[in-house]
Image (tube, grey):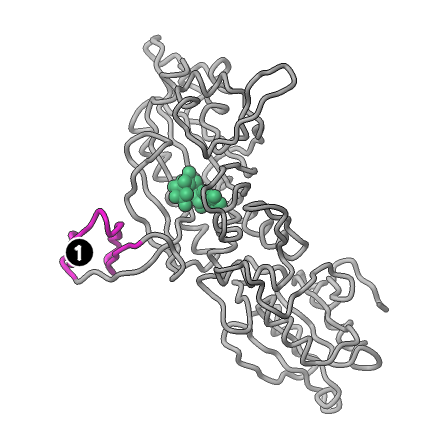
Amino acid sequence: MQNRCPHVLSMDELYAPTLKETPVEAELISHQLMLRAGMIRKTASGIYSYLPLGWRVIKKIEQIVREEMDAIGCQEVSLPVLQPAELWQESGRWPVYGPELMRLTDRHEREFCLGPTHEEIITALVRSELRSYKQLPLTLYQINLKFRDEMRPRFGLMRGREFIMKDAYSFGTDQAALDADYAAQEGAYRKICERMKMDYRIVDADSGEIGGSVSAEFMALAEAGESEIVYCECGFAADTEVCEQESCPQCGAPLQHARGIEIGQIFQLGTKYSEAMGATFQDEDGTDKPFVMGCYGIGVSRIAAALIEQKHDERGCIWPKSVAPAEVAVLALDGVGEVAETAATLAHKLAEADVEVVLDARPERPGVKFAEADLIGWPQQLIVGKRGLAAGIVEIKDRATGETHDAPLDEAVGYLVES
Ligand code: ATP
Ligand code: MG
């Protein structure tokens, strides 16, 4: 490619093997589209490799999550995936966790598991060195792989046996501190969802195997969701199994029904782990007390799938700009000559203006380029053709609405930078 620029992703170099046919093994539309758009490939049941486009999406989601965690004062760490059984014996979960826990034995016959969640690791990590009330509250988080030997891992990234989660753990002196940490996480999760243009509801939840009392789930509304929820415009939402009535318990209005994908869950753990594992701090009055803990998970890889379930059409993915693998695709309808050169120049100008841009100047038919651009789901397309150029015009297409409009050649970059 002439004018090679490191900030312009070039379709002739990009490793994104697209598929024309819908893979038969994929039931969910998100799974089908991620395979067809060359974003992921299956390595084994419930285990996926991310190709460049899929990984770009994951990194975008991770970054949004990271920024919102940092914004509420959480500190990022990285905890081991491989966890010694002793810690799980201390918490009491080793015998009860069940077949979802991936257990293994090392060469010395010591037992380990691949972490499905990290309460034991984090509690053991801080218990000898986080000692004073003056150091509290503290919330640590990581964005890392999790392993769960799911019974039916058939829905692509939606339910993997290896998947990416952000998990945060808060340590406080008392219930009031936990309430504040929990509220801060809920607020951060709301912002995360809003930045990704996710249509979501928050429902009260059961805390399941993690333990604890107060808990809420963040549900992305989508037909493919495994949960059935009811919700009201006043903000109330609940699982249908919990709320069996037809009118809102908060305001009396008729409840709406929908299906939801659980993308995140927050828990008040209280002292369940700190007591079991002897994790205490010295309080102001000089006495030792167990930490009052919370844990907060959000499924990074599941969110990628949930966003597609929520927004797609018969042609492919429709990504919000904040998560898309790139913001703008410049399509050169000729792979050579003035059209290709103008397209490359426009792509470079966009890159210089900090717009993430991909250039498609391959020697392919325009129909192939349009179809792939729609399948991958770049939010905006800048289309450069011979006829338009003769009149000094390019075309701009919005992927979500499908609307196109002409723009004078010298105004197109400015328009895309603004929008
Ligand atoms: P589910 O009920 O769907 O199995 P969970 O309640 O067991 O999920 P949590 O322990 O609450 O999951 O984990 C926090 C988040 O991690 C979930 O809200 C979800 O977004 C994500 N997650 C959990 N299991 C998986 C999985 N198998 N594949 C992908 N993401 C997952
Ligand atoms: Mg959950």
Q: Please report the residue visible at 53 percent of the width from the left and 80 percent of the height from the top.
A: 403
Q: Residue furthest front?
A: 24
SS assignment at label 1: loop
Q: Nearer the viewer, residue 139 or 255?
A: 255
Return the residue at label 1. Answer: 248
413 horizontally vs 92: left or right: right
Q: In the rendering, at what x and y percent does residue 205 appear?
A: 30, 42
361 relative to 170, above or below? below
384 relative to 64, above or below? below
275 relative to 49, above or below? above
Q: In the rendering, at what x and y percent does residue 87 appear?
A: 48, 18
Residue range in magenta is: 228-253
Image quarter for ligand 2: top left
Q: Nearer the viewer, residue 178 or 106?
A: 106
Quadrant for residue 283, please give it.
top left
- Dominant secondary structure, magenta: loop
Q: Residue furthest top?
A: 286
